[in-house]
Image (tube, rainbow, N blue to C red):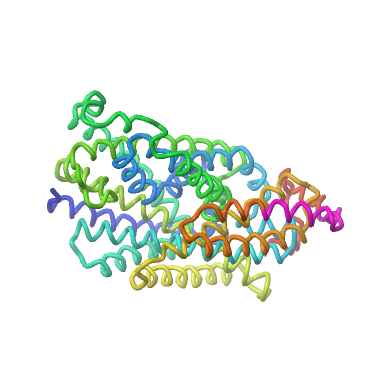
Amino acid sequence: MVTGLDYFVVLVYFGVMLVCGYIGARRSKTHEDYLVAGRRLGFWTFFACMSAVILGGGATFGTAKLGYLHGISGFWMVFMYGLGILALAVLVTTRISNLRIMTLSEMLGMRYDEKARIISALIAAVYAALIATLQIVAIGTIIQSVLGWAPKTSMLVGGLIVLAYTLAGGMWSVTLTDVIQFWLMTFGVLLMLVMGLAKVGGFAGLQTALEPSYFDLGTIGGKRIFSFFLLFFLGFLVGQDIWQRVFTARDSRTARSGTVAAGLYCIGYAVVVAIIGMCAAVIVPGLQNAQSAFPEMAIRVLPPGLTGLVLAGTLSALMSTADGPILAASTLVIRDLWIPILKPRWDDRHQTAAYRWVTLAVGVFAIVSAVWIQDVLNALDLAYDLLSGAIVVPVIAALFWKRATAQGAVLSMILSSIVVIVGLIREGLSATNPIIYGVVTSLVSLVVISLLTPPPDSARMKEWEERMMGAPARVGDAHQG
């Protein structure tokens, strides 16, 4: 049961988030501070922030729901989150940290050309804005269940709080809030695990109360597991909100070790929350909406005060995956669309102001979309499929295949985007096969076109390789925006 003390705890949490926005604003002196926290985060802060941006409402509510319905095999979704982050750490982090860039699209522009930068930025910015929209919808759902406000009011208030602290201090505010959110999330799920197992009689009680299928890693089905791989393993390799966190690390070693730690944390989180869902199947059987398994468990097993703290932790998980995409979308719009196309003459102060204005616009778009649009899931499916199907291959080729050309990269993104869209029209927006079609088309077209076109300019490639080894950018480098 939610008590007045729980309401108070949640309201205090809102206040702390706004204070973090004020502190972040005091620390954001330059546009690099605003976008990547001055590239000054050490291991523990970086690890907490990376984990927080990965594990949001989908990870928490979704895994608890899958655990409730399928048992321990519900961990596979977030396991693929962690596997994708581990792949990012091993394959990419050191190289992109050395480049000293701020966006994935900037990297593609540096390695290929401005067309590759602009096309990838369009896809990634739309995706980031839609992710923020869905997280605000989820934030509103939690606020409604805790405070009893109307759905639209709940989304509006939650969205405005996220926008306020993100707008004020950019990545510094996001960093401060993410550290708090990480520890709340960690404490919340561990407390729920202990209290839930105690209520069902431990693992022995679970085994007695549940069918054997609940303890089989394959119950959810191979096809479903493969779909998680396509959507999340590939998606996390090329998500701007994830890459932007990598750029906040103080050096490439911190980026790599912190990202590895975050990937391992995700896998542990997946197992813990799936078990919480299994406990919910015993404690609150027959839920009409399995998506409510996690908050129902919090209300049933936790004492007053701690219920509010865990619900605040749940809000934390949602807010940490709403603030990052808002900032990511504004970064892409300014750095990879506005500056390359219009080439404004801005000093640092005016550039920081521009990022704030676009952050405001993206945040307002996400809030309005959350309040007024009934279903953005179809649009999100489209954006996610395009992100994975059209951008993964050019990114990997940029880092590991010297023969890849700008013509191959640009045409592969265009052709694979068309194939993904046609596949979704023919098979439905929830289908995962279009991602496979897109990746195969992207790979074949990039390889064939690259081999049929002249090799990349030797001077450009020399500069690229020097930058990946950690050499500073040349003065006046056009790719820096």
Q: Quadrant of residue 165?
A: bottom left
Q: For the magenta stretch, what is the residue range?
A: 441-460
Q: Quadrant of residue 400?
A: top right
- Left or right placement of residue 150 versus residue 384 in this view: left
Q: Is residue 189 visible?
A: yes
Q: Is residue 329 visible?
A: no
Task: Residue at 18% x, 46% y: name it.
Answer: 299
Residue 103 drawn in magenta = no
* As drawn, 274 above or below 148: above
* As drawn, 129 above or below 87: below
Q: Quadrant of the C terminus?
A: bottom right
Secondary structure of the magenta portion, mostly?
Answer: helix
Point out the residue furthest to the front here. Answer: 426
- Left or right placement of residue 50 versus residue 106 in this view: left
The picture places residue 39, in percent across and down from the top left corner, at 57, 50
- Left or right placement of residue 47 versus residue 474 in this view: left
The picture places residue 336, in percent across and down from the top left corner, at 63, 65
Residue 455 drawn in magenta = yes
Q: Nearer the viewer, residue 112 or 422?
A: 422
Count of marks placed on residues: 0
Q: Nearer the viewer, residue 113 or 257?
A: 113
Point out the residue furthest to the top here. Answer: 204
* As drawn, 294 above or below 124: above
Q: Nearer the viewer, residue 185 or 38?
A: 185
Task: Residue at 24% x, 29% y: name it.
Answer: 206
Task: Residue at 25% x, 52% y: name it.
Answer: 289
Task: Residue at 19% x, 27% y: name it.
Answer: 201
The picture places residue 316, in percent across and down from the top left corner, at 34, 51
The picture places residue 479, in percent across and down from the top left corner, at 71, 62
